[in-house]
Image (tube, rainbow, N blue to C red):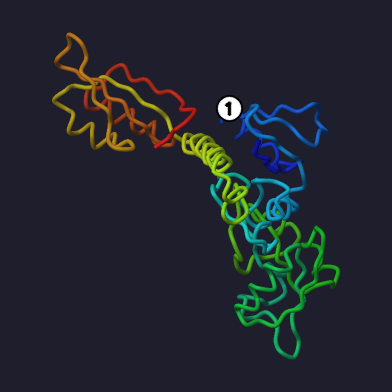
Amino acid sequence: MLRIALPNKGRLSEETKTLFNDAGLEVRSSGERALTASLGGEFEAIFVRAQDIPEFVADGAADAGVTGWDLVNESQRPLTSHLDLGFGKCRLVVAARDDAGIASVNDIGSPEKPARVATVFPRITARFFAERGRPVEIVPVSGAAEIAPHLGIADIVVDLTSTGSTLRVNGLREIETVMLSSAHLITAQGGPRHGDVLRGQQFEELVTALGSVIRARGQRYLMANVPREMLGEVRAILPGLNGPTVIDIAENGKFVAVHAVVRADAIYRTIGQLRAVGAEGILVTRIERLVP
């Protein structure tokens, strides 16, 4: 049974459990504080800190894991992403005090006076500034990096943000984005237990199951009866994955049934366009899985 390392707390944990449940891999544990659980009886989950998951996977303690791409990059371990799960989105950014007079990364530090940079991501930060040729001194912190400039611990920070509101509240202004991050499904290079064909097949089935749920999110399945003579216009309205599916309706030669996958944010407009060409009996449903 494949062992999957999952985040043990926080929003990342909750969204990961929701994804696995939607994929038919229900998280079944003996209690809220259980360290292991069954995933639909197909896989075993172990719950650890998100920042420890890259190490667990790289060292073979887990066959795969779900964690933030920022944490994978910070670990500098030989890991491979197989799927961007689409949640936990954030940005790692360089930020400075509003009154620091820093307009770009080129204004940070000098050979005579390297800038002090507070961050929870010292490896990513050191690499970023080295690539930009800016002399800095890294000040590793375990959290709340945004307070460092106000305490005189550092001149600037490199920190995670989703909306930028926490930085603004603390009088900091974004200078540049270092990287984008979201939750990823990862393994050691070569896949889970490289060379084990059965485990490789099990893992590919997991990727397919999770991917089908992710692709279905934000999509709707639309069905409608449309005049046969308007099919040209309907095909332009409903491109779908490979164009709409067209089905003859028994004992009704004037109309045909069309089925298509449509983006959820386009449904309102699509229904209006279909009604304008004489469509009837329009039905829209949610999609649980979508395998191309």
Residue in the image at 61% along x and 29% along y: 25
| Residue sitting at the far bottom | 112
Residue 119 position in % (x across, y down): 75, 65
- Which residue is identified by label 1? 24
Placement of 235 over or under 200, stated as above or below: above
- Of 64 and 10, nearer the camera is 64
Looking at the image, residue 260 lies above or below residue 174: above
Amino acid identity at mark 1: Gly
Quadrant containing the C terminus is top left
Q: How many marks?
A: 1
Locate residue 90, reporting x and y percent.
62, 53
Camera-side residue: 15 or 118? 15
Label 1, residues with CA under 10 Å away: few <14, some 14-19, many ≥20: some
At 73% from the left and 51% from the top, the residue drawn is: 56
Image side of residue 148 versus residue 93, left or right = right
Residue in the picture at 63% in, 52% down: 163
Q: Position of residue 203 (x, y in %)?
A: 56, 41
Residue 207 drawn at (x, y percent): 53, 41
Of helix, strand and loop, which one carries label 1?
loop
In percent of the image, x 24 and y 37: which residue is there? 236
Q: Residue furthest top?
A: 251
